[in-house]
Image: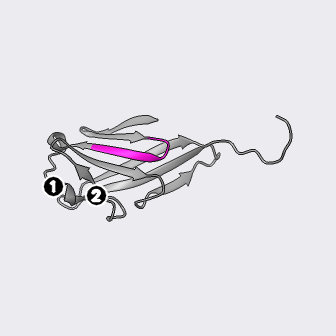
Amino acid sequence: MCLVLLSDGVDVTCNENDIQVQIDRSVQNISDPSVLSLINSSCQATSDASYINFDITLGTCGTRVAISTDGVRSFYRNTITSSADDTEFEIICSYIREPTFLGGGEY
């Protein structure tokens, strides 16, 4: 798990099965969470008085995946866009891939 600070007031937590994004309303000055969307706009944010939150299950909501050229890392990325002012937050989480062994030999 890693925590990445993208911008003041925007925190991203990369979990094993999902990406959680928390946007501080006071820092980002966002009063209406409906102006924010992911690549797949059917994935909506939840909110409370202080924060706007996205919980993105890996592989959903338009999240794209890329594998490093050495095959060691997977990169999951999505974009949060604001229709109010055309602001975009690029969300990227990097994971070390689990090794896969083929065959039945001893190691």
103 lies left or right of 100 = right
Badge 2 element: strand
**Quadrant of residue 42 in the image?**
bottom left
Q: Earlier in the sequence, mark 2 or mark 1?
A: 1
Q: Which residue is mark 2?
A: 81
Q: Measuring 42% from the left and 61% from the top, which residue is drawn there? A: 62
Q: Measuring 15% from the left and 43% from the top, which residue is drawn there? A: 49
Coloring scheme used:
one colour
Q: Which residue occupies the foreground of this view, 7 or 23?
A: 23
Give the class, few, some or many, for how many residues have Cα within 10 Å of label 1's Cα (few <14, many ≥20). Answer: few
**Residue 9, position as x, y percentages in the image:** 24, 39
17 lies left or right of 45 = right
Q: Which residue is mark 1?
A: 32
**Residue 21, position as x, y percentages in the image:** 33, 45
Contact (Cβ within 8 Å) of mark 2 with mark 1: no
**Quadrant of residue 36 in the image?**
bottom left
Badge 1 element: loop
Q: CA distance from mark 2 to mark 1?
A: 13 Å
- Range shown magenta: 15-22
**Residue 71, position as x, y percentages in the image:** 64, 47
Q: Is residue 46 above or below residue 51?
A: below
The amino acid on which the numbered mark 2 sits, given as a three-letter code, is Thr
The amino acid on which the numbered mark 1 sits, given as a three-letter code, is Asp
Give the class, few, some or many, for how many residues have Cα within 10 Å of label 2's Cα (few <14, many ≥20). Answer: some
76 lies left or right of 25 = right
Q: Which residue occupies the foreground of this view, 87 or 58?
A: 58
* Residue 17 within the magenta-colored segment of the rendering: yes
